[in-house]
Image (cartoon, coloured by chain):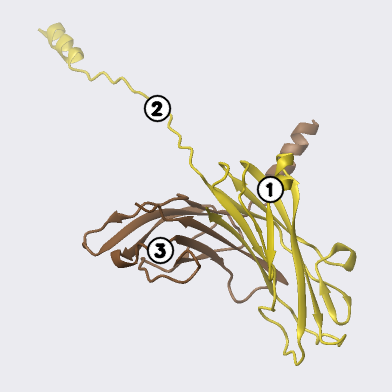
């Protein structure tokens, strides 16, 4: 009787056949990577600059697109300070964004449009990584010395679906 | 050996990225017949950022009224979150972009900071 019960018990044991599917989705995706934060140097009493030969550091932003022709990139360099000591004269801002490193040499030819303090690269027609380098300078009044204090400015990097 | 050094150096680099998917969200009917909604995923890999603001815009970047659980999402480094955006059906035709933008806390010691914004385009029917 006991062997029969054991036999029946074994028959009743569940048998699992487990599939372990691997799934993946490929979809248009954009990532904005902040690789280097810009730093202003002060080469002259009236000037702040992110240019390396003027003691500053340019910002480096990497944009990765998973598929081609789905996004454009837009960069805005500062035209005012987010915070600064009180200023009683005007500040003139200049800047530019250029393509730095590329994961595909053809990325260097992305069409670029510049207006006001904005550079737009559209479309990002090759999948991969592009490094964009943004610089900014600020000159105070007619060569007046900038008041001492901390000056904060904002660079904006955008990835916009087309 | 060189390869190991390179790999270790790459691993040591800080990762600072902002991601949002899908690129083309589709609006679905909600429980109210006058409201549609869509769901997006935000991924914060920016170490310096904990907050992202949601916004909805027309094709010429004018704001469109919308509702969501929180307009400013707190999200920790290396975490992702889903969020829903609700739009009135009367606004669907003019709503084009749903964006998330990084927000820096007011107390910052950096002399410059970089804000990132990613905009998805609403898939029109």
Q: Chain of mark 3?
A: B
Residue that appears at 69% across and 79% down: A81
* Alpha carbon separation for disc pair 1 and 3: 29 Å
In the image, which disc is placed on residue A21? 2
Query: Relative to A70, is A19 on the left or the right?
Result: left
- The quadrant where residue B102 appears: bottom right
Locate residue A118, reporting x and y percent. 67, 66
A38 lies left or right of B97 = right
Classify 10 Å Cα crowding around label 1: few (below 14), some (14-19), many (20 and above): many
Res. B95 mark: 3
Q: Is residue A148 above or below residue B68?
A: below
As drawn, which residue projects farthest toward the bottom? Answer: A88
Dot 2 or dot 1, earlier in sequence: 2
Q: A45 or B15, which is in the foreground?
A: A45
Check chain identity for marks 1 and 3: say if they share one: no
Q: Nearer the viewer, residue B77 or B18?
A: B18
CB under 8 Å between discs 2 and 3: no
Q: Which marked residue is nearer to the observer: mark 1 or mark 3?
A: 3
Q: Are marks 2 and 3 on the same chain?
A: no
Q: Is residue A134 visible?
A: no
Residue drawn at 46 percent across, 55 percent down: B121
**Chain hosting mark 2:** A
Instruction: Indicate the colour of chain A.
Output: yellow
Residue at image point 76% right, 38% down: B6
Image side of residue B98 versus residue A87, left or right:
left
Q: Nearer the viewer, mark 2 or mark 3?
A: 3
- Report which residue position mark 1 lands on: A130
How far, Cα to Cα, is label 2 from label 1?
A: 34 Å
- Work out how far the residue at label 2 is from the one at label 3, CA to CA, in angstroms: 38 Å
In what quadrant of the picture does the N terminus of chain A appear? top left
Answer whether labels 1 and 3 touch (C-beta < 8 Å). Answer: no
């Amino acid at each position: 009787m006991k062997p029969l019960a054991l036999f029946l018990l074994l028959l009743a044991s569940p048998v699992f056949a487990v599939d372990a599917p691997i799934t993946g989705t490929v979809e248009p995706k954009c990532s904005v990577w902040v690789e280097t934060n810009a730093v202003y140097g002060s080469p002259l009493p009236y000037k702040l600059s992110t240019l390396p030969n003027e003691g500053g550091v340019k910002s480096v932003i990497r944009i990765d697109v998973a598929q081609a022709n789905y996004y454009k990139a837009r960069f805005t360099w500062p035209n005012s300070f987010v915070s600064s000591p009180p200023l009683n004269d005007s500040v003139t801002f200049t800047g530019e964004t250029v393509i730095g490193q590329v994961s595909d040499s053809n990325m260097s030819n992305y069409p670029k449009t510049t207006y006001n303090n904005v550079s737009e690269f559209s479309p990002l027609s090759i999948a991969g990584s592009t490094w964009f380098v943004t610089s900014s300078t600020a000159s105070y009044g007619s060569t007046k010395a900038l008041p001492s204090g901390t000056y904060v400015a904002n660079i904006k990097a955008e990835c916009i679906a087309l | 050996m060189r390869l190991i050094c390179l790999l270790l150096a790459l691993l040591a680099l800080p990762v600072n990225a902002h991601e949002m998917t899908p690129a083309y969200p589709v609006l679905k009917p909600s429980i109210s017949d006058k409201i549609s909604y869509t769901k997006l995923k935000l991924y914060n890999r920016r170490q310096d950022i904990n907050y992202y603001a949601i916004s909805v815009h027309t094709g010429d970047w004018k704001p469109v009224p919308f509702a969501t659980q929180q307009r400013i999402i707190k999200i920790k480094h290396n975490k992702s979150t889903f969020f829903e955006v609700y739009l009135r059906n009367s606004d669907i035709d003019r709503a084009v972009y749903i964006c998330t933008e990084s927000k820096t806390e007011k107390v910052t010691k950096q002399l410059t900071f970089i804000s990132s914004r990613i905009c998805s385009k609403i898939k029109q029917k």
